Amino acid sequence: MPSVYNWQLGRRMRYPYEPASPKEQFAFVININRCIGCQTCTMACKSTWTFAKGQEHMWWTNVETKPYGGYPQHWDVKILDKLEQANPGEQRWSGTPNGDPKKPYGTFAGKNLFEVPHAIARGSQPNQVLGYLPTEEEWRFPNIHEDTPQHGQSKPMDFGSGEELSGGKKHKAWFFYLARLCNHCSYPACLAACPRTAIYKRPEDGIVLIDQKECRGYRKCVEACPYKKSFYRGTTRTSEKCIGCYPRVEGKDPETNGSPMETRCMAACIGQVRMQGLVKVDKENTWIEDRHHPLYYLVHVAKVALPLYPQFGTEPNGYYIPPRWVPLPYLEQMFGPGAKQAVERYRDPDRELLAVLQLFRRSNQIISRYEIEEGPKVYEAQRNGKKYEMYDDTVIAFNRKGKEIFRTQIEEPVYVRPAKHANSI
Ligand code: SF4
Ligand code: SF4
């Protein structure tokens, strides 16, 4: 079996196919700190792609309340438990987060989903990937446990005090919204598991698709995807999944005149928490340095955006700025060892990070590059025992053609309406 390099794990791993590195890779960053759980993204996707008969249970993008919510129910707890059973007590990371783009989070010393297939051999045919098929009941409640911060009526859950992350304040009860979609993984588990090779990664943008003519509905992809983002459709007897809104990414939408455009779920986000992009990767799927690409900056320079469950081994291309009020052990399980540093950087952003955070959702076009023009100091204070200064810098976004899409400032402009105007009451 080929050995491929997984930079999120900081090491090589088994995968059934040689790496298929695309020309550019579909990727996104979601800032959990600002998600308000409004589900606009969820409905934007649903009303575009999955409103037909047989697609009722399909939520290609969904927003679930963690720690209890999940669609299908308990998807992450179940697969984490299976991994733990297959490799008891050994799911650990070695080394520390560092500046090496080949292993920025250290090295995962445990076993990932491709490395324990013997644990789930069925008959004489071992599966390529550790997984499970959710029950029908688990697909029934797309938003179960919404806004549920604690177990039972009165007992606060005990995931630690949260003291360290919230500046001395205790948050024993907490929750956060986790917006999810297919990660268009660099090493997709769905693709690895398909016995008909009906799943492929597009060479131009790394979007993972299921060829509907080849699919026979064996549901191996549904079983293998650890994020449970492949869905079986009973009316066609095939599986379907997020298609990354590829006509928009290709620039086919008249709105952008040929420039790549963000997906429906990204473009609809009211909380301005989502940013999608196309990043350059080398032959082993490691990101090529692109210093002024906003996603490269957030993931590899500021290191505030982290992959979701990197230990699964699929090298997901969805990244999250972790919520700063959640106890660290939970965040480290979900986002790996970079969580502490990411929260600290986000709580105390420097000048460049503050500017790049303004780029979220100012346009529907995909941003390929940004520039910052320095402005005057507008604020100064003591924060977390340190001097904090804020400057009214201007950040400028460019599309793939190098054309300016928009410019915006750190401080929102204030418009004072005249005291007398027509509709005054
Ligand atoms: S998230 Fe799941 S469905 Fe999407 S590419 Fe990865 S393994 Fe496949
Ligand atoms: S639209 Fe944005 S703010 Fe609303 S739930 Fe989705 S990700 Fe969160």
Image (cartoon, rainbow, N blue to C red):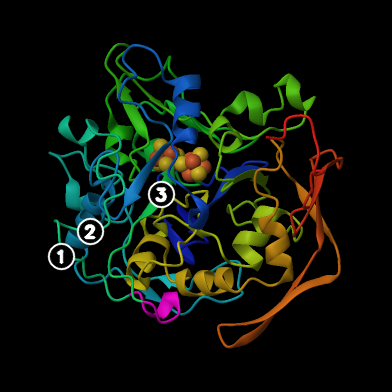
Give the number of the disc on residue 150.
2
**Kind of residue at disc 1:** Lys
> Are the residues flagged by discs 1 and 2 in contact, CB closer than 8 Å?
yes
**Quarter holding residue 52:** top left
Q: Secondary structure at mark 3?
A: strand
Q: Position of residue 326 (x, y in %)?
A: 38, 66
Q: Secondary structure at mark 2?
A: loop
User: Residue farthest to the front?
Assistant: 425
Circle nearer the N terminus (1, 3): 1
Circle nearer the N terminus (2, 3): 2
The region drawn magenta spans: 162-169
* Callout in the foreground (2, 3): 2
Q: Which residue was labeled with disc 1?
A: 155
Give the number of the disc on residue 178.
3
Residue at (65, 27) in percent of width and height: 248
- In the rendered image, the vertical position of residue 14 relative to residue 55, given as above or below: below
The image shows a total of numbered marks equal to 3
**Kind of residue at disc 3:** Leu
